[in-house]
């Protein structure tokens, strides 16, 4: 630093900074030779097997890049063989099977068997009470529907026969008008049969007692309907029968074809039924023609909706459905709906013609 300041003060030329730094040896002695770069390099201790890195001027080929020509890189202290990756190198990989599908030699399991994509039950299922596929389920449902409508047809034929006898035979008409106590007896029998079939699930599925109870209910209700029809004129009864047949046939066909689910409205219909019962008690104490016509109209409309709901419950593809074992209960529901529709229509026409 003092030498630089002296150059600045004396205004002499500043030495070239790139000039070599004066060697520290004494004058008159030879300079210190550079490091001996020509000797052998530091020996490498890695056991790679390739020749050492050449020293001296770089006139030889560049250092080879890429994989070594000898064997794989030895791991750890085992230079003779590669490190084993898995303990089972001789065996092929076997995919583990779930417990419920059996072992690899179980050719009856769903994996090896030809029925892997079939709808049938597994080979160990010997219970034939359940349907093996969807087609069998449809066949059971169709047989159930045919059985229900067959029983319903027989019930309606019996009731229609009673109505015809009580309407066209004058002797019977006079007899039931004089002996009204028979109506209350038949009503008691009907009520007991209805409660038994509606509340006792085991009983209504027990053959043949379920059919016996249904027959007793049909006979008692047919007598009641015939006795009620005997108090109306013949033309009014015939008109009510025709209107009931058209309404019920239309509602049943519509319920079978439509995609709308009427069974989802069952709760609302039950509330409306309770309101209708309260309305009927009011009509007992208030004798009014218009009020009774309104009551009969609401009753016919309500049981028409119940007929649509009960029809869709037979199909089995709605929110609420009946089991194929409940053909007696299904026929009972449809039968009581149709009879109530007939009685309310008969009341509407009879009150309108008074």
Image (cartoon, grey):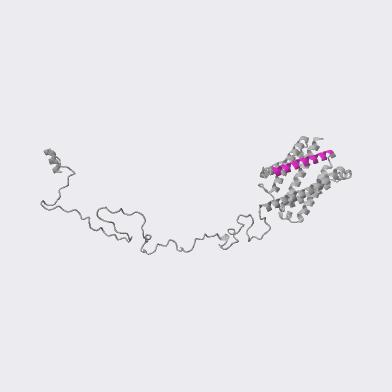
In the figure, is residue 63 to the left or right of 284?
Answer: left
Q: Quadrant of the C terminus?
A: top right
Answer yes or no: is residue 281 visible: no
In the figure, is residue 13 to the left or right of 231?
Answer: left
Q: Nearer the viewer, residue 8 or 336?
A: 8
In the figure, is residue 72 to the left or right of 192?
Answer: left
Q: Nearer the viewer, residue 326 or 103?
A: 103
Q: Nearer the viewer, residue 1 or 246?
A: 1
Q: Nearer the viewer, residue 199 or 333?
A: 333
> Residue 279, how many percent across, how many down?
73, 40
State whether the magenta stretch is mostly helix, strand or loop.
helix
Residue at the spot 76% in from the left edge and 39% down from the top edge: 296
Residue extending farthest to the right is: 171
Does residue 30 lie above or below 253 as drawn?
below
Q: Is residue 244 inside the magenta stretch?
A: yes
Residue extending farthest to the left is: 28
Q: Give the magenta range.
A: 235-257
Does residue 158 lie above or below 13 as drawn?
below
In the figure, is residue 88 to the left or right of 113?
Answer: left
Does residue 202 lie above or below 174 as drawn?
below
Q: Is residue 324 inside the magenta stretch?
A: no
Q: Quadrant of the N terminus?
A: top left
> Residue 55, how many percent across, how many down?
26, 56
Place residue 242 in its image quadrant.
top right
Place residue 56 in its image quadrant.
bottom left
Answer yes or no: is residue 156 visible: yes
> Residue 241, how many percent across, how many down?
80, 41
């Amino acid at each position: 630093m003092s030498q630089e300041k002296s150059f600045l003060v004396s205004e002499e030329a500043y030495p070239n900074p790139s000039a070599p730094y004066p060697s520290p040896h004494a004058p008159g002695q030879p300079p210190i030779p550079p490091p001996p770069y020509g000797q052998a390099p530091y020996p490498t201790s890695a056991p790679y097997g390739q020749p050492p890195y050449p020293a001296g001027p770089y006139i030889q080929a560049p250092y080879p890049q890429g994989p070594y020509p000898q064997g794989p890189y030895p791991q750890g202290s085992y230079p003779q063989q590669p490190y084993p990756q898995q303990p089972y190198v001789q065996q092929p990989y076997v995919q583990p099977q779930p417990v419920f599908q059996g072992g690899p030699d179980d050719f009856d399991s769903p994996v090896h068997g030809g029925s892997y994509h079939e709808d049938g039950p597994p080979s160990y299922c010997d219970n034939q009470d359940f349907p093996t596929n969807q087609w069998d389920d449809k066949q059971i449902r169709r047989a159930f529907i045919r059985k229900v409508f067959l029983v319903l047809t027989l019930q309606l034929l019996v009731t229609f026969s009673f109505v015809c006898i009580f309407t066209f035979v004058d002797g019977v008409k006079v007899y039931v008008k004089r002996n009204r106590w028979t109506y209350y007896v038949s009503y008691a029998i009907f009520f007991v049969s209805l409660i038994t079939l509606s509340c006792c699930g085991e009983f209504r599925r027990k053959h043949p007692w379920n059919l016996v109870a249904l027959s007793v209910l049909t006979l008692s209700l047919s007598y009641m309907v015939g006795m009620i029809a005997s108090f109306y004129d013949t033309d009014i009864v015939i008109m009510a029968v025709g209107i009931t047949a058209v309404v019920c046939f239309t509602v049943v066909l519509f319920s079978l074809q439509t995609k709308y689910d009427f069974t989802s409205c069952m709760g609302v219909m039950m509330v409306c039924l309770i309101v209708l019962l309260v309305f009927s008690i009011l009509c007992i104490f208030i004798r009014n023609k218009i009020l009774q016509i309104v009551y009969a109209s609401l009753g016919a409309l309500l049981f028409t909706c119940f007929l649509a709901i009960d029809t869709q419950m037979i199909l089995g593809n709605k929110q609420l459905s009946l089991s194929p074992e409940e053909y007696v209960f299904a026929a009972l529901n449809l039968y009581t709906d149709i009879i109530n529709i007939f009685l309310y229509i008969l009341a509407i026409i009879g009150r309108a013609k008074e």
